[in-house]
Image (cartoon, grey):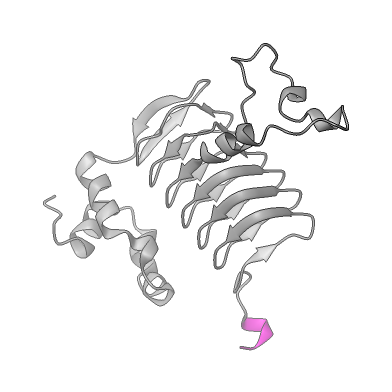
């Protein structure tokens, strides 16, 4: 392909300042500067803005994440006599002490799951163990401590549902269609359908089970 006709994101683009640790990044993703991803996966076509911090999370395809988002912000052990990290990272302070590996294993297992085609707004925080459904929108500055239903807009501290994006029948149809699993060429062949807000027609065209 001629370089002048090459798309901006013909392949995954990761800024040189990004820090990765046991991270799996999909096709045609973009990760901007000063972002950290550890023990996490990012699905095809998803992108992360600047200054994001993602840990212990599985993020679906075509999900848009704005700047300064925190996903999987770890909790401190509130049930112990002390919440301080000396209880699980004592080697930071005492050379002969060993870290609490069971604590970290439990933290790793309390994963965040973010679906496909989600939009996570600027400076949102998603706490451990939360699931954000397909097509959901998390408003800027929200703190999400409970699961976010598919195709629902949530905002506030703590985040609560504001409204549904579509009626249930359409949301269910979009999940059956699962267009995010279509081959690239089919998605761009049908680009005009994605640009239209005639959402019922989209469902009728691509979901035989859609009753309208």
Do we see residue 72 in this rendering? no
Residue at horizontal 39 percent and vertical 68 percent from the top? 191
- Residue 3 within the segment the image draws in magenta: yes
The image quarter in which residue 132 lies: top left
- Seen in the picture, residue 146 relative to 81 is either above or below; the reply is below
Residue at horizontal 35 percent and vertical 36 percent from the top? 149
Range of residues picked out in magenta: 1-5
Image position of 26 (left or right of 8)? left
Q: Report x, y in % for residue 45.
A: 52, 62
In the image, 75 versus 51, the foreground residue is 75
The image quarter in which residue 125 lies: top right
- Seen in the picture, residue 74 relative to 40 is either above or below; the reply is above
Residue at far front of view = 96
Q: Report x, y in % for residue 151.
A: 35, 41
Q: Report x, y in % for residue 134.
A: 38, 47
Residue at far left of view = 211
Quarter of the image with the N terminus in it: bottom right
């Amino acid at each position: 392909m001629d370089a002048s006709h090459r798309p901006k994101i013909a392949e995954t683009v990761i800024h040189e300042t990004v820090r990765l640790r046991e991270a799996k990044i999909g096709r045609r993703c973009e990760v901007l500067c000063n972002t950290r991803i550890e023990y996490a996966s990012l699905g095809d076509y998803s992108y992360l803005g600047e200054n994001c911090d993602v840990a212990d999370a599985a993020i679906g395809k075509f999900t848009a994440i704005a700047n300064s988002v925190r996903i999987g912000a770890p909790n401190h052990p509130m049930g112990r006599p002390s919440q301080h990290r000396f209880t699980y990272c004592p080697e930071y302070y005492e050379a002969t002490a060993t870290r609490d590996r069971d604590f970290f294993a439990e933290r790793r297992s309390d994963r965040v799951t973010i679906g496909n085609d989600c939009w996570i707004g600027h400076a949102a925080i998603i706490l451990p163990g939360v699931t954000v459904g397909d097509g959901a929108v998390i408003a800027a500055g929200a703190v999400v401590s409970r699961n976010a239903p598919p195709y629902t807009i949530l905002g506030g501290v703590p985040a609560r549902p504001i409204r549904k994006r579509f009626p249930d029948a359409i949301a269910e149809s979009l999940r059956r269609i699962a267009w995010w699993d279509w081959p690239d060429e089919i998605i761009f062949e049908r680009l005009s359908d994605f640009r239209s807000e005639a959402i019922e027609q989209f469902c009728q065209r691509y979901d035989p089970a859609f009753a309208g």
